Amino acid sequence: MANLNCSKVLVVGAGFSGAVIARKLAEADIAVDVVDSRSHLAGNCHTARDEVTNVMVHAYGPHIFHTDNEKVWEFVNQFANFKPYVNRVKAITNGKVYSLPINLLTINQFFNKTFSPDEARKFIEDIADNSIVDPESFEDQALRFVGKDIYEAFFKGYTEKQWGVSPKELPASILKRLPLRFNYDDNYFNHKFQGIPEEGYTAIIEKLLDYANITVKLNKNVEKREAKDYDHVFYSGPLDGWFDYKLGRLGYRTLDFIEERHEGDFQGCAVMNYPDSDVPFTRITEHKHFSPWENHEQTIVFREYSRPCGVSDIPYYPIRLLEEKKLLNEYTALALKEKNVSFVGRLGTYRYLDMDVTILEALEASEKFLALKSNNNKI
Ligand code: FAD
Ligand code: UDP
């Protein structure tokens, strides 16, 4: 709950969560200190030009902005020029290249057919496992909606590599993120708005934080005891970290990016997935294809490897299996008892959040805080 006479706020984390909250509060004349343990702004959305190739690199993996939310789209467009961009992912499985998400081209190429949309729909319905009524696991969801052959070629190996567990243990919700299409639309996302900021994401965060009343400090890890100097804290660091991991650690996957530079064009697209189990990485990102309006003779690619997150690694994907959910509930109960601390963002709430949802939640958290403050001032 907010200290309603608040005049000085600490924001832990300079990713989208922290930067949006800091900006909204500062616009309401509140003094805000933003602190981040990393040496740069923008958290996992950080972008920077590669010194050798001059390509804009998505340092923590490929980030494409996509949303259906007009409020969020309008908000981010105040801080960047978004270039139109459609994410068209490819996948190499069993020695052949296919289009993702699974669409009519993928189905026709994979089964060596020339189906019309209706024929493909009927064919997939026939090969899908219709005995599964209400799929709960990732595997059941895949078998129910695309059948064994597509599941094994595109999803099983990738998911095992990505999550380190059997798709039988993962929730169906992870697969539900991906569309299944019976036309030739190969847009990876269904959202109305999609784009890439011309100058990268870090430039957006810089603009958000460039405002009177905001101070920014990098390379500084904030601990709970430092909160006492402030009227309120918005914390976008790891939920369990705030409590010094006293109940144990919430599980995450971390990523390693092995970079290579080449002349010319390496793979012809921004993201190539590798679902085969005998390939150790999950995907290769070629960053220059995220900025097709720029010309670069050289190229930089990241091979992406997923593994369990160690104590000193950067947490990427929350693993929300049964055990973690139990621990999460225990930490959430502790969080609710904290006075003057709001837990926000992907780490503070231990959820996989896209950028648009992160921004929306940050806007809502600031609005709620300011409304409480203003009601109090009227009393
Ligand atoms: P973060 O960006 O993680 O920021 C939190 C910050 O807090 C970090 O900078 C961290 O250093 C700092 N911090 C933590 N603890 C402390 C502490 N104790 N003291 C000081 N500082 C601290 N979303 C999309 O919309 N589109 C995409 O294409 C997309 N691709 C993604 C690809 C990958 C590989 C991953 C992992 C995520 C992707 N996302 C994507 C999601 C996106 O990264 C998140 O929505 C976004 O980063 C969330 O912002 P945040 O501010 O909550 O967290
Ligand atoms: N996935 C897969 N094969 C692919 C792409 C995705 O099996 O080629 C699975 C994988 O389990 C992944 C999930 O689908 O975690 C969601 O995919 P998405 O592209 O949304 O993953 P993210 O953006 O989280 O990396």
Image: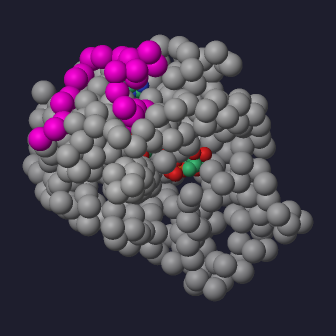
Q: Is residue 332 left or right of residue 289?
A: right
Of residues 105 and 142, the one nearer the viewer is: 142
- Residue 168, above or below 233: below
> Residue at image x 44%, y 64%?
189
- Residue 370, above or below 296: below
Q: Is residue 228 magenta?
A: yes
Q: Is residue 68 left or right of residue 81?
A: right
State the image quarter where residue 215 is shown.
Answer: top left
- Residue 26, above or below 244: below
Q: Is residue 330 left or right of residue 203?
A: right
Q: Is residue 185 magenta?
A: no
Of residues 17 and 280, the one nearer the viewer is: 17
In the rendering, at what x and y percent does residue 105 appear?
51, 70
Of residues 191 and 18, the one nearer the viewer is: 18
State the image quarter where residue 330 is shown.
Answer: top right
Of residues 305 and 335, the one nearer the viewer is: 335
- Residue 318, above or below 260: below
> Residue at image x 51%, y 78%?
183
Residue 8 is at least partly visible in this image: yes
In the rendering, at what x and y percent does residue 286 appear?
30, 42
In the rendering, at what x and y percent does residue 182 appear?
57, 77
The span shown in magenta is 212-235
Residue 283 is at least partly visible in this image: no
Q: How many marks?
A: 0
In the rendering, at what x and y percent does residue 164 appear?
65, 30
> Residue at image x 62%, y 59%?
176
The C terminus, quarter of image: bottom left
Q: Residue furthest right?
A: 131
Colour treatment of the image: one colour
> Residue at image x 32%, y 45%?
21
Q: Is residue 222 left or right of residue 203?
A: right
